[in-house]
Structure formats: C-alpha cells, structure tokens
Image (spheres, helix red, strand yellow):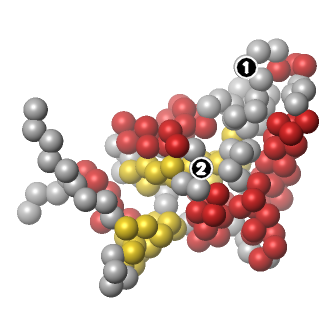
Amino acid sequence: MARTLYDKLWDDHVVHVEDDGTTVLYIDRHLLHEVTSPQAFEGLNIAQRPVWRNSANLAVSDHNVPTTDRSAGIKDPVSKLQIDTLDQNCDHFGITQYKMHDKRQGIVHVIGPEQGATLPGMTVVCGDSHTSTHGAFGALAFGIGTSEVEHVLATQTLLMKKSKNMLVKV
C-alpha cells in the first residue's frame, strides 16, 4: 500500500498507540524560546524532573531580542526577564542555547534549518505556530503549547492522534 511522507515519518516515530488512537510519538528535535518555555521549566523544577535528552533540545533567544542595536540591551523589563529566565533555565538544565549576542541567534523557526538542527526525516516541535514550516525540509513538524513543551522536555515524546490524509487533485 502506498504511503505518504507523513505516514512514513509518523510510523517511524511511533513509540506506542492506545486503543483510541492516542499515540506516543518520539520527538527528534525540540526547539525552545523564551516565551513558551518558562512555565515548562518551572513545571520540571517543581516535579524535580530532569530534561530527558538534553542533546535533542536547542534554545534560542527569539521573540524579545531587539532587531536593531543590540548593544543597548533589552529595555522592556518583562522582555528582559523572559530572556534572562531562558538563559538561567538552559544553564540549569544543560541545554544548548544561542543567546542574544551569539552569531547563530535568530528566529526560532529559521535557526533549525540554518544550523542543521532540522533535517529530513526528523520530528520537530516548538512552542511556536510557525514550526510546521520545517515540513519544507522533509521533517514532520508541529507547533505545540506550553504544557506540551514541558512534556517533551521530560519525556522526549508527544501525545497526539494521527491526522487524516487528504487527496488534493489540481
């Protein structure tokens, strides 16, 4: 039976399937940024859980980084707190991070492909709605919420149901 790329990537990453179709899907790459990760890291700290696989996670200061004159720093106190919190969490949990002044720093859904962290055949998740654009690189990619960010940090898996395929004729 013919299978789509989606079917192949999904099947290659299934850890377990429940009777109702809920699937434990292995995640190859988890991209993190300062907006959707603080509560996830706090949840790990409260539960005293480690990050399951540090090397599968990559963080970048993204949403609150100035686009011009970074030498002036971040003026908004809430934005600065989010960046500082990401720095502290990545240091504490041993996660590689491209900080604000790192030449590899950039937009979270762009740095994955730019830096070779997103590759064909991978599953990729991030707490950012643009994450699905990694599909252009042959990856199966999903934007996820903060509680899912915590779950992936703790287990390197995601719980979800497989979407249906759609035939499009032009």
Relative to 39, is 135 above or below? Answer: above
Please indicate whether residue 159 sits to the left or right of residue 162 in the image: right
The quadrant of the image that shows the N terminus is bottom left
**Is disc 1 surrounded by few (<14), some (14 to 19) or many (20+) residues within 10 Å?**
few
Residue drawn at 39 percent across, 75 percent down: 22
Residue 98 visible in rendering: no
Residue 109 visible in rendering: yes
**Is disc 2 surrounded by few (<14), some (14 to 19) or many (20+) residues within 10 Å?**
many
Residue drawn at 76 percent across, 15 percent down: 68
- Point out residue 14 in the picture as x, y percentages from the top left corner: 37, 70
Give the number of callouts. 2
- Point out residue 47 in the picture as x, y percentages from the top left corner: 77, 77
Mark 2 lies on a secondary structure that is: loop
- Point out residue 57 in the picture as x, y percentages from the top left corner: 62, 54
Rendering quarter of residue 137:
top left
Q: On residue 163, which mark appears?
A: none
For mark 2, what is the residue?
Answer: 127
Please indicate whether residue 112 sits to the left or right of residue 2 in the image: right
Marked residue nearer the N-terminal end (2 or 1): 1
- Give amino acid for label 1: Thr
For mark 1, what is the residue?
Answer: 67
Residue drawn at 54 percent across, 32 percent down: 110
- Give amino acid for label 2: Gly
The quadrant of the image that shows the C terminus is top left
Relative to 88, is 49 above or below? Answer: below
Label 2 and label 1: CA atoms lie apart by 21 Å
- Residue closest to the eye, 138 or 79: 79
